Image (cartoon, rainbow, N blue to C red):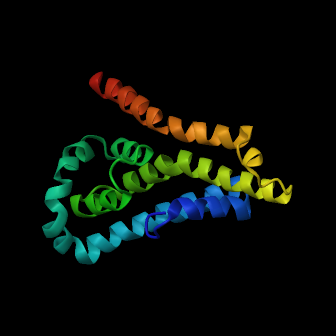
Amino acid sequence: MTLIPGGIILTILGGFLFGNWLATFLVLVSASVGALVLVLIIRMGFGGLIHKRVGHRVRFMEKAFRQNAFLYILSLRLLPIIPFFMINLAVGILNIRLKDFFWGTFWGIAPATFIYANIGTNLAILIENNNLSISGIINGKMLWALFLLALLPLLSIFLKKFTRNIFDNI
């Protein structure tokens, strides 16, 4: 999802072809590893050049990364207000621990990945049952998936509030 544009469409297609659980697993692993490879490429070869070009644009992230990189990346992935490629660039030039980046990315994209794969799985079921109509598409399972997708920003807000309380008490 990070190196190839159209990650949402590919995730839905994965759910359509492989089912919800396998598609979710495959996308989580491939997207997280892909993002990690991009960060490594930035660090090994293009970090200086990229830092000169976009360093000023990602400087605002530096303090949050230093406080708790894992939770910051997790929050950014749950609520994608900043494009994923910009997060990858920031991590590459700001020298964030790769372990924090990988797991923050993995768990941060997990809820949306599961929901999109579920949409693809539901579409496959509708086609298999020859019920690809408006009433077939707008069913309980599909509405539930869309409802969960709409709730993802609230999860990020809750996580931020919860972790802020934890770190304030330390």
Quarter of the image for residue 74 reads: top left
Quarter of the image for residue 154 reads: top left
Q: Is residue 159 left or right of residue 19?
A: left
Q: Where residue 51 sits: x, y (%)?
A: 17, 66
Q: Where residue 36 sits: x, y (%)?
A: 41, 65
Picture residue at 58% right of the left edge, 65% below the top: 10
Q: Where residue 134 sits: x, y (%)?
A: 72, 48
Could you tell me how many numbered marks the image carries? 0
Query: Is 4 located above or below residue 123 in the figure?
Result: below
Picture residue at 67% right of the left edge, 50% below the top: 118
Q: Where residue 86 sits: x, y (%)?
A: 30, 59
**In front: 134, or 117?**
134
Q: Quadrant of the C terminus?
A: top left
Q: Is residue 85 left or right of residue 120?
A: left
Quarter of the image for residue 84 reads: bottom left
**In front: 168, or 53?**
53
Picture residue at 26% right of the left edge, 47% below the top: 65
Q: Residue furthest front?
A: 134
Query: Is 25 located above or below residue 75 in the figure?
Result: below
Q: Residue furthest bottom?
A: 45
Picture residue at 57% right of the left edge, 62% below the top: 9
Q: Is residue 102 left or right of residue 117?
A: left
